[in-house]
Image: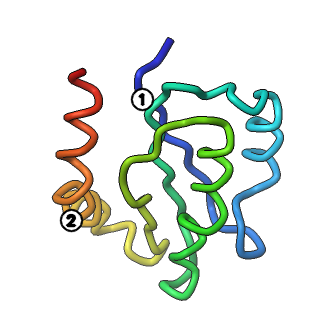
Amino acid sequence: SADLAIFASPTYKASFTGLLKVFLDRYPNDGLAGLVAVPVMLGAGRMHQLVVETQLRPVLVELAAIVPTKGLFVVDSELDTLEASIESWWRTAGQPLDRLLSV
C-alpha cells in the first residue's frame, strides 16, 4: 500500500545483489504497478555508476513500477558526504517525485 519504495543494493559483480533479486522475484510482472520506485546503489567507484540505470531500473520497470528519475549511485568512499550526494540528486529528482506523489 506504499506510494514510494526505495530499492537499494550494493554493487556486486556489476549488478545488484542476489538477495534483492530473490526479493523482486517474488513479484509477478506487474507486481509493482503504480508504485513510485527509487533505485539506489552503492559501489566502489564511479566506473560502476551506470549499474543503477542498466541493471536495477529495467527490472523495476518490468515489474511495472514508475521510475521517474535517475537512480542514486553512491561511492562507498564518499559515505562521509552522503548528505551532499543526496541533496545533489534531489535537485533534479525532487520535483518529479513530489509531482507524482501529490497526485
Residue 33 to residue 98: above or below = above
Q: Element at badge 2? A: helix
Residue 77 coordinates in the image, percent (x, y): 45, 78
Residue 59 to residue 101: above or below = below
Nearer to me, 33 or 50 = 33
Nearer to me, 87 or 96 = 96
Residue 14 coordinates in the image, percent (x, y): 71, 75
* Residue 79 location, quadrant: bottom left
Q: Amino acid at mark 2?
A: Ser
Residue 31 coordinates in the image, percent (x, y): 68, 25
Residue corresponding to mark 2? 88
Seen as rendered, the residue at the extreme bottom is 47
* Residue 23 location, quadrant: top right
Mark 1 → mark 2, Cα distance in angstroms: 20 Å
Q: Residues within 10 Å of mark 1 (few under 14, many from 20)?
A: some
Relative horizontal placement of residue 64, taking residue 87 as reference (left or right) = right
Tell me which residue sits at (46%, 46%) in the image.
Answer: 67
Relative horizontal placement of residue 26, taking residue 102 as reference (left or right) = right
Residue 23 to residue 83: above or below = above
Q: Residues within 10 Å of mark 2 (few under 14, many from 20)?
A: few
Nearer to me, 3 or 84 = 3
* Residue 98 location, quadrant: top left
Residue corresponding to mark 1? 4
Residue 35 coordinates in the image, percent (x, y): 49, 28
Tell me which residue sits at (54%, 66%) in the image.
Answer: 53
Give the mark nearest the N terminus, 1 or 2.
1
- Depth check, mark 1 against mark 2: the one in front is 1
Tell me which residue sits at (56%, 72%) in the image.
Answer: 43
Q: Amino acid at mark 1?
A: Leu
Relative horizontal placement of residue 35, taking residue 99 as reference (left or right) = right
Q: Element at badge 1? A: strand
